[in-house]
């Protein structure tokens, strides 16, 4: 898998259609999480590709939430993103807004981790540290079971993602916390740089 777009070009393309800090933070977080997973699962040489897919996965969500993953191909083609990468990006909407099925391990990870990063991020903001660095899987599991907490994060999608990967839910939760620890500082620095 080779990327036809550089990281700098991908970030510019993202920022063209996404202005809200919340969406930019999510994109950078999922990028970092995807890179961590690439290394963790033995796809280290594809880490940049996995990261770019994560960075661009919600490119159309801020402007076209009702047409999520349907508008994305047009916006991505404009940035010379390959058809292969467009498929990977859009497949995270499988069964939600598109029929494209996640096939590659990377697409399954994106499907599973995307929704979960939102839940973990919300749980981190409730902590005194405002960080995932001191978050334990047990406390995340309590938040996961509390349907009122971060109600917008679909538990079903997260469960389906774990199943798609052939993992227990706990394994997905634990690994994604580690992935977010790995990229938290870099993401925070990049967000601070954008606000200057």
Image: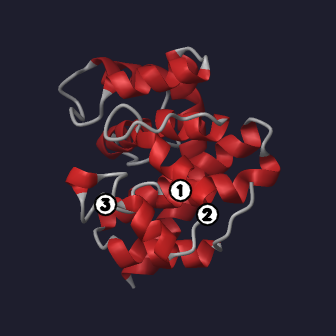
- Image height check: is 115 above or below 63? above
Q: Quick check: marks 2 and 1 in contact, CB under 8 Å?
A: yes
- Label 3 or label 1, whichever lies nearer to me, is 1
In the image, what residue occupies the spot 80% across and 38% down? 42
- State whether residue 134 appears in this view: no
Residue 119 picture location, percent across and down: 35, 37
On screen, residue 155 versus residue 137, left or right, reads: left
Q: Nearer the viewer, mark 2 or mark 3?
A: 2
The disc at residue 82 is 2
**Gap between marks 2 and 3, in whole Å?**
27 Å
Mark 2 element type: loop
Q: Where is 98 relative to 183, above or below?
A: above
**Badge 3: residue crowd in 10 Å (few <14, some 14–19, many ≥20):** few
Foreground residue among 176 and 63: 63
> Contact, CB < 8 Å: mark 3 with mark 1?
no
Residue 190 x/y as whole percent: 50, 71
The residue positioned 46% from the left and 49% from the top of the image is: 90
Whether residues under marks 2 and 3 lie with C-beta atoms below 8 angstroms apart, the answer is: no
Judged from the image, the secondary structure of the residue bearing numbered disc 3 is helix
Tag on residue 86?
1
Label 2: how many Cα within 10 Å (few below 14, some 14–19, many 20+): some
- Along the viewing direction, whichever of 186 and 15 lies nearer the viewer: 15
Numbered disc 1: secondary structure = helix
Q: Residue placed farthest to the left in the image?
A: 148
Neighbours of disc 1 within 10 Å: few (<14), some (14-19), many (20+): many
**Residue placed under numbered mark 3 in the picture:** 22
Q: Where 172 falls versus 68 (above or below)?
A: above
In terms of depth relative to the viewer, which is nearer, 82 or 43?
82
- Image quadrant in which you'd find residue 75: bottom left
**CA distance for labels 2 and 1:** 6 Å
Q: Residue furthest bottom?
A: 196
């Amino acid at each position: 898998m080779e990327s036809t777009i550089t990281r700098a070009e991908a970030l510019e393309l993202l920022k063209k259609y996404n202005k809200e800090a919340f969406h930019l933070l999510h994109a950078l977080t999922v990028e970092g999480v995807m890179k961590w997973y690439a290394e963790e699962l033995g796809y280290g040489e594809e880490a940049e590709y996995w990261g770019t897919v994560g960075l661009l996965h919600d490119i159309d969500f801020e402007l076209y939430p009702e047409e999520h993953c349907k508008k994305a191909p047009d916006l991505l083609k404009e940035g010379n993103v390959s058809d292969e990468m467009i498929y990977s990006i859009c497949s995270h909407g499988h069964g939600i807004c598109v029929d494209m099925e996640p096939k590659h391990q990377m697409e399954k990870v994106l499907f599973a981790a995307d929704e979960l990063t939102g839940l973990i991020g919300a749980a981190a903001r409730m902590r005194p540290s405002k960080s995932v660095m001191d978050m334990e899987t047990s406390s995340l599991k309590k938040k996961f079971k509390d349907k009122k907490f971060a109600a917008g994060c679909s538990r079903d999608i997260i469960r389906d993602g774990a199943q798609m990967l052939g993992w227990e839910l706990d394994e997905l939760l634990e690994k994604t916390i580690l992935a977010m620890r790995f990229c938290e500082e870099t993401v925070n620095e990049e967000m601070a740089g954008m606000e200057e």
